[in-house]
Amino acid sequence: MRRSLPAALTLAVLASTMALTSCAAGGPAPAASTTAAVASPTPSAATNGPATIAAPSVCDAVDLKADAAVAGADLAACVVGFSKAAGSGHETFSASDGTTGTADFVFGDAPALSGTVTSSGGTTSFVLTPDASWVTIDGAWVQGDATSSDPKKMLAGTIGQAYRAFADPSATASLISSAPTWTVQKDQDVVDLPDGTQARAWRVQADAPFSAVGADVQEMTLWLTSGHVPAGVQATVSAAGTQTTTTQHFSGWGMPVSIATPQP
């Protein structure tokens, strides 16, 4: 079993921002067989295409125009509020250490995730539900138990706890609000989304480096469309002597997601 370099993963800004340490698998992840599933809510605005999610009223405090100043607490409330309103989505992510991955997520009071992380050490799959976690170790699904004497179950449980902690909406709010002030930049960017489309989005940047969850954040940028839809996030973070830049892009907000639990 080999441990990959740390990778920062933002879900559900999250959707959100998550810092993940993954254990690389010894081979490709086996297919999961379903014993239960967590399904995302289907927004009333959903159609056969992407759902149209109205920005919640908390986003009124985030003025998306050039040079507008935004308080970190207001930005956090907007991003989390939108993510809860959408309820689910899809993301891709990559890090400067070569780590890449994808995830489907259910966002809200009972967050759930499923996806894969690929690094130089291999590919790790994960499934998290509100009350359990599964991680592939040496190519096989292991249900996590942080209190187990079995080292694989203990490792899977520890990784699962970290994934779940950073998937919680309050963790996302804490990270964003740790930067007191942000500024909307002058020009909109064209952002490539995971579904193959593009979106014009405002670039909102933290005004200064800040510290959060035991790490130093040198730079952090959020991309929000004019409808306050999170399109992406990028952060350069230093922790334990290692600096990593992680980029995430989001699509499929509000589209139904089914997260199946694997059969070990």
Image (spheres, rainbow, N blue to C red):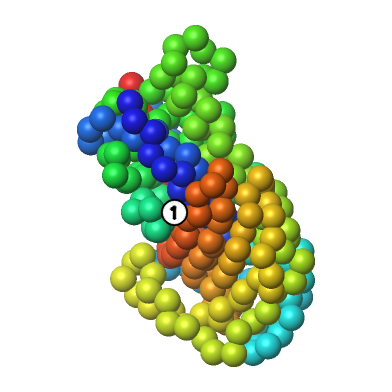
Numbered circles on residues, count: 1
The percent position of residue 11, horizontal first and vertical second, equals: 52, 53
Reading the image, the residue beneath label 1 is: 256
For the N terminus, the image quarter is top left
Confirm whether residue 43 shows in the render: no
Q: Nearer the viewer, residue 22 or 77?
A: 22
140 left or right, relative to 251: left
The percent position of residue 47, horizontal first and vertical second, equals: 43, 67
Residue at screen point 57% across, 70% down = 221
Task: Indicate the amino acid at tag 1.
Answer: Pro
The percent position of residue 93, horizontal first and vertical second, equals: 41, 57
Give the residue furthest to the top: 149
50 left or right, relative to 87: left
Confirm whether residue 251 shows in the render: yes
- Indicate the quadrant where residue 186 lies: bottom right
Residue at screen point 50% across, 43% down = 20
Circle 1 SS class: loop
The percent position of residue 126, horizontal first and vertical second, equals: 40, 37
Q: Which of 99 and 35 is in front in this view?
A: 99
Residue at screen point 56% across, 43% down = 240
Residue at screen point 50% across, 54% down = 243
